Amino acid sequence: MIVVGSRGSQLALWQARHISKCLQELGADTLLEIIKTTGDKITDVPLAQVGGKGLFTKEIEEALLAGTIDLAVHSLKDMPTALPAGLTLAAFPEREDPRDALIGKPLRELRPGDRVGTSSLRRAAQLHALNRGLVIETLRGNVDTRLRKLDEGQYESIVLAAAGLRRLGWENRIQELLEIEVMCPAVGQGALAIETRDDGGPAFELARKLDHITTRRAVTAERSLLATLEGGCQVPIGAHAKVHGSAIDLRAIVASPDGQRVVEGSLSGNEPIDLGRRLGEHLLLAGAREILAA
């Protein structure tokens, strides 16, 4: 029996059940264990103010290390770049669309003073950088709570990850997919991470069979960049890697929260960790260090 740990949100449960089904197709019996994380308990404060890394992973990783669960399914964008000793990311299944989506009014229809809801410092910074006079307001809650607040007229638009909307069957709510050049996604956005103990045990061996090599190469480059910049998931950093054969094109952005300072760059290479490190160092020299320090 493989015990699969997950947060209790609608999206997290969809992801955990999806991976459980994949494991069952490989012949495993699975049991789902729901774990409440710090990030789930704090619902009235912007995540950027809470600070700290691993808001949505700490309690799940503790359960993995204690042996009460065998495997955890995470949204990769919630994962810190450094894992606790004894744990590993055994697999990255094939990635969904990494782009952000606007629900409500599309970008061309938004006017100065229109309210746009997001919980993400990265999204807020890039919206401010458009210089459209938009009012960016904090939006917390699970996906259906956020959609309800939009429908009640609290916002003209909200920004959510396209992947989550697709997974939950709400693709028809997407008004506009924001291209990478307009809104650079979060590191690992659209990808799932399967975390296990690094003991080479049955859960690790099973999970490895779900690894998608192209996704692994792309997200490894993005996470190497994030590690070089030393940014957590609540820092205004965006990155997106595209794999063509053996080559990887990596694009990244670091923005001040008010969108007034933006440092961006892109590089290509074949080795994901080296590529992420080189682009991260380039951005730091180009002004990202000052933005992140502030």
Image: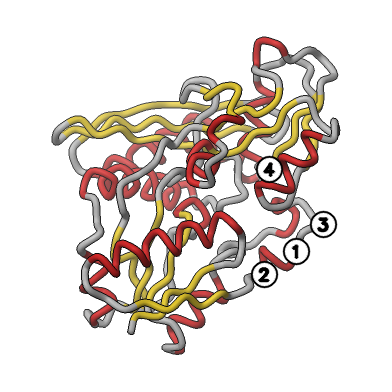
Q: Amino acid at mark 3?
A: Asp
Quarter holding residue 155? top right
Residue 2 appears in which quarter of the rendering? bottom left
- Is residue 178 or residue 181 the one in the foreground? 178
Q: Which residue is mark 3?
A: 44
Q: Is residue 217 above or below residue 202?
A: above
**Residue in the image at 48% along x and 26% along y:** 264
Q: What residue is pinned by disc 4?
A: 294
Type of amino acid under label 2: Thr
Asked which secondary structure carries label 3, the reply is loop
Q: Are marks 1 and 3 in contact (CB under 8 Å)?
A: yes
Secondary structure found at label 4: loop
Element type at marker 1?
loop
Q: Where does label 2 land, which residue?
A: 38
Q: Position of residue 137 (x, y in %)?
A: 80, 36
Residue 277 seen in render: no
Mark 3 or mark 4, which is nearer to you?
3
**Which residue lies at the image location 32% right of the left edge and 39% below the top edge?**
278
Quarter of the picture holding the C terminus? top right
Location of residue 143 in the rendering, given as x and y in whole percent from the top left corner = 65, 47
In whole angstroms, how far apart are the C-alphas of marks 2 and 4? 25 Å
